[in-house]
Every structure is written in C-alpha cells, then in structure tokens.
C-alpha cells in the first residue's frame, strides 16, 4: 500500500495520502489540515509497543473465549505484567461480558498495527477487510508454548521510522474522516471497513503519542 507514496516525489505527507485515496476512489476532504510535524512527535519506544502488544494479545484470547478473565489475570501476574494493564483492561478481565468481548475483539486490528510497527509484518494492507493475525509468524508471537513474554518486551527492537509511522497515521486520519462522513450521511462504503479504519487509526494515534493520551483515552479526531 505505501509504495503509492512514491508516486509524487517532493509532495507533502498530506498530498501523498490524498494520492492514495484518489487511487482507491475514496472520498477526500481536501480541507483537512496536516497532522503533526516530524519534529513535534515522539514515537513510542520498542519496549512500550511490545508491552502493549503482549497485553492486547492476552485480552484478545479472552475476547475470543480462549481464556477466562481470571486465567488471563493469573497469567499476567505470573510474569509480573499486570502493571501494563490499563484501568479499562483490568475491568474487562474482572468482568468480561459478551458486550465487552465484542468490543475487545476489534483490537485484533490494533495488534496488527503494533506488529507492523515492530516489523513483525511487512505491510498494514488496505483496510477494506479484517486483518488475519495468523499472518504473524508463530515464532514472533510473544505468548504460548512456555514462552516468557518478558523476553519479547525486553528485546532490542528496530521500530519503524517516525516518518513511516506518521505517513500511516496521516492516511488513516483521512480515511477515518471518510468513514465518519459516510456514517453521518447514511452512505455505505464498499472499499473501506469502518471498524478496521477506526481501530488502526486508534493504534497509530497511540504510537505517535497523539495529545499525550494513554491507551484508554486515545481520541481519533477527524
């Protein structure tokens, strides 16, 4: 997907994103402003991304009924990882209702974005369909088969560059505007999955420290 950024040499990040949207015939709001400059952004560290990745993988297992909330909390306690749980995640594990499980299941898309940021997958792929977490190699997954997830967290990570992450954040910011516009106007989107776009926008905003918001409080302004 991001090879399309090469089409307009010397273009701004905004113009490159708009070129991708034009390529896919997606409605564009040309008046949307630029997102933050590279100099104004600090990307999350490799250990921050990896620890968030681990927590999301565990809560994802609860969301899909592979673990109970109590089992997940016990697992995290065994490896001294409960410190990484957010308040909302603690509440989820304490009472994983069907509604909360449904909401949490969408975090597969956040896991996918973080895997991309850690270079565990090569391409975010276009958000017209759900990701497939089975595309992450089992050897790269932090949990299962007696693995200690702390080894994953404490690795020396080569995180994707700030410029590349900001390219993706800008593109999803503009896609999310299209999704919101379609919802407000009762328009059905054929080439974007609204849930996928929102969750990926959410994870990307967390990655770029948008408004210095913690995970539970990330906003996806459009």
Image: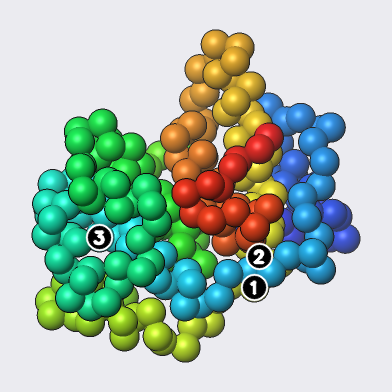
The structure residue drawn at horizontal position 37% and vertical position 47%, both measured from the top left corner, is 88
Name the disc covering residue 12, or none: none
**Above/below status of 187 relative to 11:** above
Closer to viewer: mark 2 or mark 3? 3
Q: Earlier in the sequence, mark 3 or mark 1?
A: 3
Residue position marked by numbered label 3 in the rendering: 58
**Above/below status of 3 relative to 65:** below
Q: Is residue 52 left or right of residue 102?
A: right
Name the disc covering residue 161, or none: 1
Q: Is residue 54 visible?
A: no
Q: Distance between the Cα atoms at labels 3 and 1?
A: 27 Å
The structure residue drawn at horizontal position 55% and vertical position 18%, both measured from the top left corner, is 183
Secondary-structure class at tag 2: helix
- Assess whether mark 2 and mark 1 are in contact (beta carbons under 8 angstroms): yes
Residue farthest to the right, as pictured: 10
Q: Position of residue 45 (x, y in %)?
A: 55, 75
Residue farthest to the top, as pictured: 186
Residue position marked by numbered label 2 in the rendering: 164
């Amino acid at each position: 997907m991001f090879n399309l950024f090469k089409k307009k040499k010397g273009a701004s990040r905004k113009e490159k994103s708009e070129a991708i949207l034009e390529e896919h015939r997606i409605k564009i709001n040309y008046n949307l402003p630029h997102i933050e400059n590279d100099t104004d952004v600090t990307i999350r560290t490799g250990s921050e991304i990896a620890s968030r990745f681990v927590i999301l993988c565990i809560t994802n297992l609860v969301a899909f009924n592979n673990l109970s909330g109590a089992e997940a909390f016990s697992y995290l306690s065994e490896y001294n990882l409960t410190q990484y749980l957010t308040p909302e995640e603690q509440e989820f594990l304490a009472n994983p209702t069907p509604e909360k499980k449904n909401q949490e299941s969408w975090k597969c898309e956040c896991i996918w974005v973080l895997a991309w940021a850690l270079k565990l997958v090569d391409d975010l792929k276009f958000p017209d369909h759900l990701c497939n977490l089975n595309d992450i190699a089992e050897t790269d997954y932090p949990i299962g088969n007696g693995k200690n997830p702390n080894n994953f967290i404490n690795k020396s990570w080569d995180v994707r560059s700030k410029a590349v992450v900001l390219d993706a954040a800008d593109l999803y910011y503009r896609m999310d505007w299209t999704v919101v516009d379609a919802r407000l106007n009762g328009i059905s989107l054929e080439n974007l999955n609204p849930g996928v776009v929102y969750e990926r926008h959410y994870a990307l905003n967390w990655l770029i420290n948008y408004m210095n918001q913690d995970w539970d409080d990330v906003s996806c302004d459009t």
